[in-house]
Amino acid sequence: MPLEQELKLVVNGGAAIELSSLVLPNHTIEGNIKAMRLVSTYFDTAELYLVSQGLGLRMRQSDGVSMQTVKTSGHVQDGLHQREEWEHQLDGAEWDLAKLKQTPLAAIIENTAIWSKIGPVFTTDFERKTLQLCTEDGTRIELAYDRGRVIAGELSQVIHEIELELKAGNVEHLNVLANELQQQLSLSPNDTSKAKMGYQLIS
């Protein structure tokens, strides 16, 4: 099963970061900075059954493409998030139930009394700029800089963070990169995911 490993750093302050100005002596930049807008809706029951089971369900739209994602709560320490993740691109805006049944959601989908109550509970809307990085040993990392908001009804909270996601190789390089960034920017390890921010708002 896919294991997502990423290190989150909250940006202290509201000033925008210019990725092109970063100095990363231990990493080679591949390609150019890419920018996109990501709008994600998170789903649960009114009683928040999914989160009580350590599960998250998300539908994300970007550039006209929809993606469904299931995540487990996993393990978080000092900003390093490690969790199982199942992500699939959709042909439209409806769930691919066959793919969802290949995840821990299978038993919940079969229980129509619960699945019928699943609905949107909050949304995240942010701009993401990304850099693809590699090291001499072949480790590959995606640096994502996110600015926007998590929105739950009339409540909202700012999103301003950097995510370092391991694509391949040695997870220790996430800490090396984080240290490089913290020498240049005011950043703090962040144990709170965007999903957790949304659940905190609605609770």
Image (tube, grey):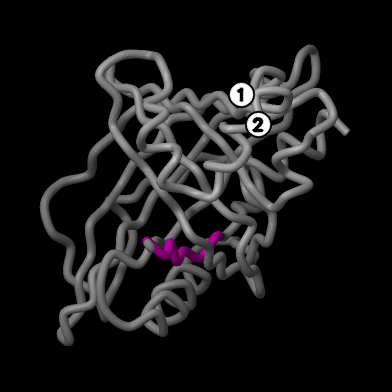
Q: CA distance from mark 1 to mark 2?
A: 25 Å
Q: Is residue 144 magenta?
A: no
Q: Is residue 5 magenta?
A: yes
Quadrant placement of the C terminus: top right
Task: Identify which residue is drawn at 30% across, 25% down.
Answer: 90
Would residue 1 be found to the left or right of residue 109 on screen? left
Residue depth check, mark 1 versus mark 2: number of the one nearer the observer: 2
Would residue 163 be found to the left or right of residue 24 on screen? right
Would residue 59 be found to the left or right of residue 160 on screen? left
Residue at the extreme right of the image, as rendered: 203
Pointer 2: what residue? 111
Measured as percent of width and height from the top left, residue 12 is found at 66, 53
Q: Secondary structure at mark 2?
A: loop
Tell which of 199 and 140 is nearer to you. Answer: 199
Q: Quadrant of residue 169?
A: bottom left
The region drawn magenta spans: 2-8
Q: Are marks 1 and 2 in contact (CB under 8 Å)?
A: no
Task: Identify which residue is drawn at 32% across, 37% down.
Answer: 88
Q: Mark on residue 28?
A: none
Instruction: Tell me which numbered mark, 1 or 2, is placed earlier along the sequence.
Output: 2
- Identity of the amino acid at label 2? Asn
Measured as percent of width and height from the top left, residue 157 is found at 72, 31
Q: Quadrant of residue 87?
A: top left
* Magenta span main SS: strand
Q: Secondary structure at mark 1?
A: strand
- Identity of the amino acid at label 1? Thr
Disc 2 crowd rating (10 Å Cα; few below 14, some 14-19, many 20+) is: few
Pointer 1: what residue? 123
Tell which of 103 and 167 is nearer to you. Answer: 103
